[in-house]
Amino acid sequence: MVVQDLKIRFYAGAPLITKAGHALGTLCVIDHRPRQLPELQKITLESLAKQLTAKMELRLANQELKQEYLDLETQHDRLKQHFQMVAHYLRSPFNGLMGSPNYYRIIITCIPVMRCYKS
């Protein structure tokens, strides 16, 4: 936004347009002296505008990928904790019963049954 008279006598601009067709703004060159912009400089300004737009889109994509990575890392940590807990219970299924007063009765009743199957 121009607040005061800068006595701009030369302006050249190239639009910043995304691949999706959204106009972001303009890359411009200004001067207080009148000038002519040769064709090669016009092409260069347009090329710079395209490079700037591509860099902004890449930066946005990079930020989105970083966020997705953080989300996946959080999910991975949760799943890892869950599977560690499941593995713990699978390795020691009777740990919960050990503190139970019925633990020894369960063992004693299981032993005769096992002997019946062995004979």
Image (cartoon, grey):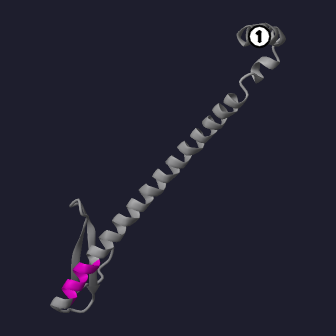
Query: Could you say where residue 109 lies in the image, as x and y percent from the top left?
Result: 78, 7
x%, y% of residue 17? 23, 66
- Between residue 7 and residue 94, name the one nearer to us: 94
The residue under label 1 is: 115
Kindly identify the amino acid type of the residue bearing the numbered disc 1.
Arg
Whether residue 37 can be seen here: no
State left or right for residue 47 relative to residue 115.
left
Residue 49 placed where, x, y %?
27, 76
Our reading of the magenta stretch's main secondary structure is helix
Residue at 40% over, 65% down: 59
Frontmost residue, 56 versus 28: 56
Up-down: is 94 above or below 119?
below
Q: Is residue 6 magenta?
A: no
| Highlighted range, magenta | 41-48
**Quarter occupied by residue 74:** top right
- Secondary element type, mark 1: helix
